[in-house]
Amino acid sequence: MSVRSKNLNSVFYADSYHPIQAGSIDGTDVVPHDNAVYRAQLCSSIGLYDPFGDPRAAGDPYCTLFVARLSRLTNEDNLRKVMSKYGRVKNFRLVRDIVTGASRGYAFVEYETEREMRRAYMDAHHLIVDDSEIIVDYNRQQLMPGWIPRRLGGGLSGKKESGQLRFGGKEKPFRAPLKPIPYEELKKLGIPPPPEGRYMSRFQVPSPPRRERNLSDREEDSHSHRRGSNDRNRTEDSHRSSVDIGEGHCRSSSHRDDHSRGRSSLERSGRYHDRSSSEKEHRYRSSTDKDKHSQKRKESDRSSSEKEHQYRSSTDKDKHSRKRKESDRSSPEKEHGLRSSTDKDKHHRKRKERDEQS
């Protein structure tokens, strides 16, 4: 990787605000490059802007989050609902135009704790709200030294079409310088030089400034820590004593428990044997009942088959007797017919003979 490509991927962020430095892409300019930067430099040098003079900027700045690039259709309810996902919202202000009352596209959200604000600072950046990609940042108005707002030519980020880009913030950081750094000129103007050898990558996000703790706060924290440790020691001692007392009671009652356990085991074994014997007897009875039922069923089947055979034999005998009777009846009729036919033949023969003789 060449030195040029390495420098393009290395960035750094501004800890304090200077209008001339904010107008430079690498933080090394020593003269204003447009009139807006000149106006911001003038306001900064003569002290025309007071970051703490806005009465509407109330609340804890370390717990306040700045939300920008909001849609004009986003109202207080929608934005509060979205930002409540990251913590408990204590105070909320959507900035509107004094004359028209329309939204100006940015808001301030104050959370209950600093931890909730940091969570929203890391997770809500580039979130889509009402078809608009928002950006979030900490309250630079009160926490960044030398801050000048956008309406006076300062601010951060911006759009390329406006020609007034401001660098050094979360959205558009400074790039590592590609040319020699003018240390003397930067020192005269009070601009901090780039941190050579301590650059960050584009994927690293700087954390917001933390609250400074004075000596009294530290003493109170140490005193509360000692008090908490003493309370913990007392609770541990009381817990140990209660455990010892409980062990004594357990030892005295262990013999009773063993005796009762022996009795209960004997009773359980007797009950188990009784139960097993009754279950075996029940099984034997059920098996014998099943055998008896099967034998009865077989006998009934046999008797039904014998009855059917007897019925069939009786019907066959009746049929045979009927046939025999019919045959007996038909035999004399056949004999009579045969005799009559023979008589007729004899009479016919005799008549022929007579006719022949005559």
Image (cartoon, rainbow, N blue to C red):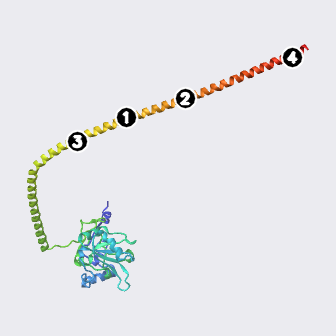
Which residue type carries mark 3? Answer: Tyr
The crowding category of the residue bearing disc 2, from other C-alpha atoms within 10 Å (few below 14, some 14 to 19, many at least 20), is few
Image marks 4 and 2: residues in contact by CB distance under 8 Å: no
Q: Secondary structure at mark 4?
A: helix
Image spot of residue 347 (x, y percent): 82, 18
Q: Is residue 168 visible?
A: no
What's the residue at 9%, 63% (across, down)? 234
Which residue type carries mark 1? Answer: Lys
Image marks 4 and 1: residues in contact by CB distance under 8 Å: no
Residue designated by label 1: 292
Residue designated by label 3: 272
Where residue 239 is drawn, which disc sits there?
A: none
Is tag 4's residue or tag 1's residue first in the polypeptide sequence?
A: 1
Mark closer to the observer (2, 1): 2
Image spot of residue 211 (x, y percent): 20, 73
Residue that sits furthest to the top in the current view: 357
Quarter containing the C terminus: top right
Is tag 4's residue or tag 2's residue first in the polypeptide sequence?
A: 2
Between the C-alphas of marks 3 and 1, the distance is 30 Å
> Quadrant of the rendered structure where residue 210 is?
bottom left
Which residue type carries mark 2? Answer: Ser
Residue designated by label 4: 352
Mark closer to the observer (4, 3): 4
Between the C-alphas of marks 2 and 3, the distance is 63 Å
Mark closer to the observer (4, 1): 4
Is tag 2's residue or tag 1's residue first in the polypeptide sequence?
A: 1
Is tag 2's residue or tag 3's residue first in the polypeptide sequence?
A: 3
The crowding category of the residue bearing disc 4, from other C-alpha atoms within 10 Å (few below 14, some 14 to 19, many at least 20), is few
